[in-house]
Image (spheres, grey):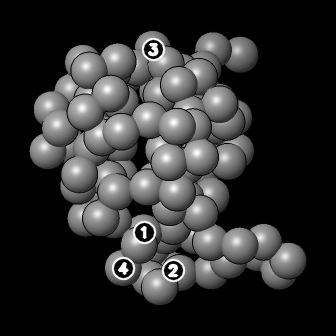
């Protein structure tokens, strides 16, 4: 299974459930893109440069205004840079839900 297939099959339904509906599975803390980026030891500028996106895009992800809409290859690079798997990325909830 390709990364893009896994993202579409596994991540999108979880993303919809967790972000749009605002549910956090029992026993799990809310995850935000900002928290994941900081845990990886990356600044907004570093992550933007490594992914080839604008710093404004990373700021938008951090604030919860948008979710990374990247190609499958770039999505794979994002999870690698953050040191997470696709399931963790799918569980990201927007900071505005706090």
Q: Is label 2 in a helix, a strand or a loop?
A: loop
N-term mark: 1 or 2: 2
**Element type at mark 1:** loop
Dot 1 alpha-carbon crowd within 10 angstroms: few under 14, some 14 to 19, many 20 or more: many
Q: Along the line of sight, which residue is nearer the eye, 81 or 11? A: 81
| Relative side of 4 to 66, left or right | right
Please name the residue shown 48% across and 44% down the image: 37
Q: CA distance from mark 3 to mark 1?
A: 23 Å
Q: Nearer the viewer, mark 3 or mark 4?
A: 4
Tag 2 or tag 4, which sits nearer the N-term? 2
Q: Determine whether label 1 and label 2 are within 8 Å by CB.
A: no
- In the rendering, which numbered label is found on residue 94? 1
At 45% from the left and 14% from the top, the residue drawn is: 73
Residue 73 is labelled as 3
Q: Residues within 10 Å of mark 2 (few under 14, many from 20)?
A: few
For the residues bearing labels 4 and 1, Cβ distance under 8 angstroms:
yes
Q: Position of residue 4 (x, y in %)?
A: 53, 23
Name the residue carrying label 2: 21
Q: Residue at x 14, y 44 (%)?
A: 56
- Which badge, 3 or 4, comes first in the chain's sequence? 3
Q: Are marks 3 and 1 in contact (CB under 8 Å)?
A: no
The Cα–Cα distance between marks 2 and 3, rounded to whole angstroms, is 27 Å
- Distance from the alpha carbon under mark 4 to that under mark 2: 13 Å
Q: Nearer the viewer, mark 4 or mark 2?
A: 4
Query: Given this view, does label 2 or label 3 mark the residue nearer the observer?
Result: 3
Question: How packed is label 4: few (under 14 Cα within 10 Å), some, or many (20 or more)?
Answer: few
């Amino acid at each position: 299974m390709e990364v893009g297939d896994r993202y579409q099959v596994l991540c999108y339904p979880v993303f919809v459930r967790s972000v749009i509906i605002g549910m956090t599975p029992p026993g799990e803390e809310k995850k935000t893109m900002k928290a994941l980026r900081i845990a990886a030891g990356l600044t907004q500028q570093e992550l933007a440069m490594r992914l080839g996106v604008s710093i404004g895009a990373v700021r938008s992800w951090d604030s919860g205004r948008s979710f990374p809409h990247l190609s499958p290859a770039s999505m794979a690079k994002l999870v690698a840079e953050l040191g997470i798997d696709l399931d963790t990325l799918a569980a990201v909830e927007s900071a505005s839900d706090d």
